[in-house]
Amino acid sequence: MGLFSTRDWNVIAVIFERKDMYRVNGNRSKGGAAIKTRDGAKTHARTIFWAVFDQKRAFLEGDAGPGASIVTPDIVQRLKRELPTNMTVQNILKLLESGQTAMAAKPLGWTGYPKVEAPPSE
């Protein structure tokens, strides 16, 4: 980054809520606050995957978080691959980019949740 450039990031964290629902938290931060926001997402105990995007929706960085141990490695890999194009993530990024809000959260609409096992029939 140049001498006068500033960070203006949208930080996304996929948070484990329950086995069949994850939440997408998004925060728009600038400058030093952007680093703190990213680090908070990286270290949150239930973060499955975190990502940083610029204001043009370019993926800058991202990785599995501490909550990745709660789910299977396949889920983490699928989130890593599909997160930038996921509609819920795109909608949150759109809200953050518009300046309407600096924070947004929604349940993750996604087909990769583990299949719910049916109770045994008697």
Image (tube, grey):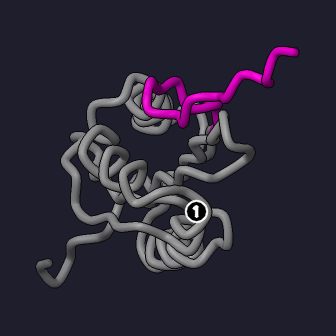
Eyeballing the image, is 15 above or below 87? Answer: below
Residue 14 appears in the picture as rendered? yes
Residue 55 point in image, percent of width and height: 29, 45
**What residue occupies the far right of the structure in this picture?**
122
Q: Nearer the viewer, residue 108 or 103?
A: 108
Judged from the image, the secondary structure of the residue bearing numbered disc 1 is strand
Residue 9 point in image, percent of width and height: 37, 58
Look at the magenta stretch and give its main secondary structure.
loop
Q: Is residue 109 magenta?
A: yes
Eyeballing the image, is 101 above or below 49? Answer: above
> Which residue corresponds to the image point at 36% horizontal and 29% vertical from the top-left?
86
**What residue occupies the far top of the structure in this picture?**
122
Q: Which of 71 and 47 is in front in this view?
A: 71
Q: How many marks?
A: 1
Eyeballing the image, is 39 above or below 111? Answer: below
- Type of amino acid under label 1: Thr
> Which residue corresponds to the image point at 47% horizontal and 52% vertical from the top-left?
12
Residue 1 point in image, percent of width and height: 14, 78
Q: What residue does disc 1 label?
A: 47
Which range of residues does the magenta coloring cover? 105-122
